[in-house]
Image (cartoon, rainbow, N blue to C red):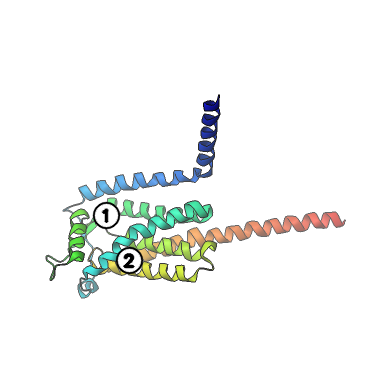
Amino acid sequence: MRYHNKKEQAVAALRNITYRYRHAWLLSYLAVYLTWFTYLEQTVTKKFHIITLPVDLEIPFCEYFIIPYLLWFLYVTFGIAYFFFKNKTDYYRLCAFLFTGMTVFLITSAIYPNGHYLRPEEFIRENWCTSLVDWLYETDTPTNLFPSIHVYNSLGVHIALARSECFKDKRIVRTLSLLLCCSIILSTMFLKQHSVFDVLTAFGLAAVMYYVVYRQAYRKVLAVLRVDERKKEQVLHGLRL
């Protein structure tokens, strides 16, 4: 009987956790994204449209930018995980922002295969940063580049942090987020991972999604509040009569 009670408690606890974090289903999109992205990386290898701008040739290679480039993975993971546990509204908005842009990227890459030849053929010096860059070049092909997901997702996470009530009084966190976001964006160009064109298209897409996810959503909330206020006034007016 004692074992039976413990089992029931465990089942009840599991149900409670499942219900409390039911919004985790959104993260299943990552399986779709990774599968599709891996397919594109394996198929788009030789025949693709070259995407470069003259300014790309003026940007020097700097291996030290590998540090913020790799910090991107922790940055995005932190943003999603933090809002997953702390604020579901911000979590849904961030996921809508990120996953919509990532889908646009996948569709663009499938319809218009693209890439560049900006990577240096050899490094002028050898150090632990160039070793990491060499590893990056071996694992990530210079194809399927625009809009840059590194840039787009960094903007998405910073916007989410900057607009969230959770960080309203945490100026240091918002400042550090901005600095990291900017350094990640710069890293994509200084490591020759992306063209300036990839960065600009990421900014353009982020601007559109910011309007859709935050500005439009905000207006809808205000509209609902106004309706509620009108109903409240009507009820009070009826009571006075």
Q: Nearer the viewer, residue 13 or 60?
A: 13
Whole-percent x, y for residue 24 in the image: 46, 45
Whether residue 195 is visible here, answered yes or no, is: no
User: Which residue lies at the image location 55% right of the left edge and 63% below the top edge?
Assistant: 165
Whether residue 86 is visible here, answered yes or no, is: yes
Q: Nearer the viewer, residue 123 or 211?
A: 123
159 vs 40, left or right, is right
Amino acid type at image mark 1: Tyr
Instruction: Specify the quadrant of the image occupied by residue 184.
Output: bottom left
Q: Circle 1 is placed at which residue position? A: 112
104 vs 136, left or right, is right
- Pointer 1 local density, CA inside 10 Å: few below 14, some 14–19, many at least 20: few
Frontmost of labels 1 and 2 is 2
Closer to the chain start, of discs 1 and 2, is: 1
Quadrant for the N terminus, please. Answer: top right
Amino acid type at image mark 2: Ile
130 vs 238, left or right, is left
Q: Considering the numbered disc 2 on the image, is that residue within a helix, a strand or a loop?
A: helix
How far apart marks 1 and 2 lie (CA) works out to 25 Å
Instruction: Specify the quadrant of the image occupied by residue 197.
Output: bottom left
Whole-percent x, y for residue 169 in the image: 54, 68
Whole-percent x, y for residue 15 in the image: 52, 36
- Pointer 2 local density, CA inside 10 Å: few below 14, some 14–19, many at least 20: many
User: Which residue lies at the image location 20% right of the left edge and 62% below the top edge?
Assistant: 133
Relative height, residue 238 to residue 117 (above, below): above
Q: Nearer the viewer, residue 182 or 118?
A: 182
Q: Circle 2 is placed at which residue position? A: 184
User: Which residue lies at the image location 30% right of the left edge and 44% below the top edge?
Assistant: 35
